[in-house]
Image (cartoon, rainbow, N blue to C red):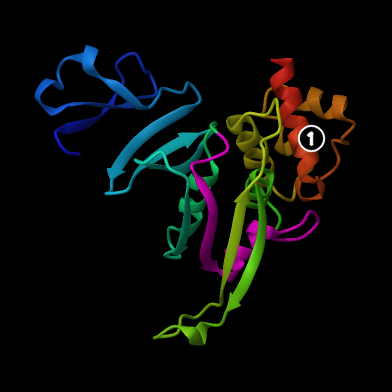
Amino acid sequence: LDERMLIRTNWQAQNFRIVVAPLAGCGDRTLWRDVVPHDADVFLQSMDVFRDFLAVNERSGGLLRIRVQPWSGEPFHIASNLPYNVGTALAVGWLSGEEWPPAWKSLTLMFQREVADRIVAKPGTDAYGRLAILAQWRCEARIAMPVHRSAFTPPPKVMSAVVHLTPKEQPDGVRMATLEALPGAAFGQRRKMLRQSLKGVRGAAEAMEQAGIAAERRPETLEIEEWLGLARLLETNR
């Protein structure tokens, strides 16, 4: 940054925060200004600085993700042919964070077809899981077009698809960290009943009983609204 320095610090921030300071006075903490504030539920592992945005590797609820934060405050659209090895992490980064709606107005992204199917998957299908819940909680998600492997040179071994996502309003009473923790735990033991897969999430059993969700159900049978309801009850019961 021109004449400025980005600092990842745990000063007054157990899980670290990222601040910006004048290069000439970076040791003077009274001049520090938050870029990514401290969050008790999110551990900031590292960061990479790019011309148009900051990419932060962070961990929340035991799950890794990438936060992508633009320098400009103007709304923008993101369109990209994402590398297959980082596509999911980048998408999760754009969809995550407590602040919503995001700075971007739409995402138009190319993924490996298997990942695209997971983003738009419906309950009761093999592809339905944490990624579908996150994407469809926060966005209208659809496959814009399939892309045959012959479109590339050399052709990859897999098919691709372009996914288009536009932000929705965020429901009240649901925090990102809570909604990540529930499906993260449940789909980590996908074949088990919710009684077993969520037993490590404090308050989950009581929330299921309050919501009228049978503990014998498996995670892929729950509609997104049911996951939202559980997350909301966990917040309320704290």
**Picture quadrant where residue 148 is located:** bottom right
Label 1's element? helix
Nearer to the camera, 134 or 126: 134
What residue is shown at x 27% (from left), y 49% (from top)? 51
Is 54 left or right of 130, judged from the image as shown? left
What residue is shown at x 32% (from left), y 38% (from top)? 46
Depicted 202 relative to depicted 137: above or below: above
Kindly give the residue lying farthest to the front in the view shown. Answer: 74
Q: Amino acid at mark 1?
A: Arg
110 in the magenta segment: yes
Which quadrant of the figure contains the C terminus? top right
Depicted 16 relative to depicted 115: above or below: above
How far across and how far down the image is residue 203, in percent?
A: 73, 22
What residue is shown at x 42% (from left), y 65% (from top)? 83
Is 63 left or right of 33, judged from the image as shown? right
Which quadrant of the figure contains the N terminus? top left
How far across and how far down the image is residue 223, in percent?
A: 80, 46
Start-end of magenta stretch: 100-127
How far across and how far down the image is residue 220, in percent?
A: 77, 50
How far across and how far down the image is residue 67, in percent?
A: 43, 41
**Picture quadrant where residue 85 is located:** bottom left
Nearer to the camera, 96 or 99: 99
238 in the magenta segment: no
Is 41 left or right of 227, judged from the image as shown? left
Mark 1, residue position: 195
What residue is shown at x 36% (from left), y 18% (from top)? 13
Depicted 238 relative to depicted 207: above or below: above
Instruction: Answer few, some or many: residues within 10 Å of disc 1's Cα (few below 14, many 20 plus, some between 14 and 19).
Output: some
